[in-house]
Image (cartoon, rainbow, N blue to C red):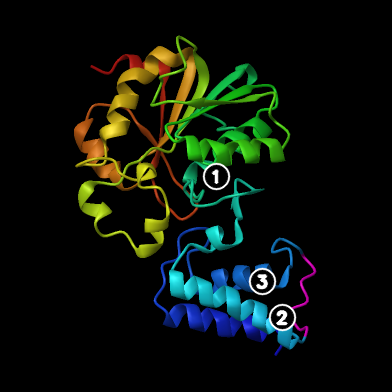
Amino acid sequence: MKLEVQVDQVAQDLEDANLFFGHGTDNAFDEAVWLVLEALGFDAGADDIPWTQDLTEHQMDSVHDLLSKRIKTRQPLAYLVNKAWFAGHEFFIDSRAIVPRSHIGEWIPDRFDPWLANDNVSAILDLCTGGGCIAVSLALAFPEATVDASDLSKDALDVARRNVERYGVEKRVRMIEGDLFSGIGNKKYDLIVCNPPYVSDELMSTLPKEYHYEPELAFSGGQTGLDFIQRLLKEAADHLSPKGLLVVEAGSAQQALETAYVKTPFTWLMSENEESVVFIISADELAGLS
């Protein structure tokens, strides 16, 4: 069987299994490409993949084994291969931390231009850092800045440390174990980024099985999904520099947030898939919140 035919077959098998796709891919074919190339040891980002190559029986067995694990367990493929991509970078991931997929990654390579005063960014905070993918990506995009990466989960921070070490940014990325701004003191930042738990209690009960392998702490946002975000908006101004910026993914709590803060001047960013779930707000605008 040729490689390209194997991909088509795996895509059909994934589709027939009625799996959920949303942990690095959003459809059966893209996930099939990823799964097959991982099983065969190919670099999914390479330009010279031999699509017309005939696979050996051993290679097809490797593909079948990984496919079987994905279908039988419904674990996200990222956990099965301990690999994920974010903001153009490859990261280690396992079930101690959420699989990175925040829309925030779309604006990191361009350093949040034009909303952020990029000529004066020396201190950045990544709240709810999880596996550290946002923090490391920020450190790579802002080589002149230090990055504090905070999370309530010690297990998630262990994953983050592995990614920090992988990219050699240990001297600029500091791990902080704590809730919200605890452990930070009076430090102020030019940029605070956060992908918080924002799933409402009602939605938590409807999540696909794939989500159940991820830490519940990373999802559960309370009755309306706003428990963490409301605390963040209340306290963030005290930790931003005068021209600082807060960037937050509100996800499924976007409508609840707009309803709760009708007069707040959130700027909603349009993602590549035309979702507006990431907002930015300046230090001045936050200071005006009652």
- Proximity of marks 3 and 2: CB atoms separated by less than 8 Å: yes
Q: Position of residue 129 (x, y in %)?
A: 49, 35
Q: Which residue is mark 3?
A: 39
Residue 70 versus residue 161 in the image, above or below: below
Q: Which residue is mark 1?
A: 106
Q: Sequence order check: which comes first, mark 3 or mark 2?
A: 3
Residue 116 versus residue 47 in the image, above or below: above
Q: Sequence order check: which comes first, mark 3 or mark 1?
A: 3
The amino acid sitting under disc 3 is: Ala
Magenta includes 187?
no
Q: Which residue is mark 2?
A: 59
Residue 57 versus residue 87 in the image, above or below: below
Rounded to the nearest angstrom, the CA distance separating label 3 from label 2 is 8 Å
Asked whether, in this view, residue 33 is left or right of residue 263, the answer is right
Label disc, if present, on residue 146 of the rendered structure: none
Residue 132 versus residue 245 in the image, above or below: below
Asked whether, in this view, residue 280 is left or right of residue 164, the answer is left
Provide the residue span drawn in magenta: 47-53
Query: Residue at the location (53% across, 79% down)?
Result: 11
- Proximity of marks 1 and 2: CB atoms separated by less than 8 Å: no
Q: Position of residue 144 (x, y in %)?
A: 69, 22
Rounded to the nearest angstrom, the CA distance separating label 1 from label 2 is 35 Å
Q: Position of residue 172 (x, y in %)?
A: 66, 24
The amino acid sitting under disc 2 is: Gln
Query: Crowding at label 1, few (<14), some or many (≥20) Cα neighbours within 10 Å?
Result: some
Judge depth for marks 3 and 1 and give the one in front: 3
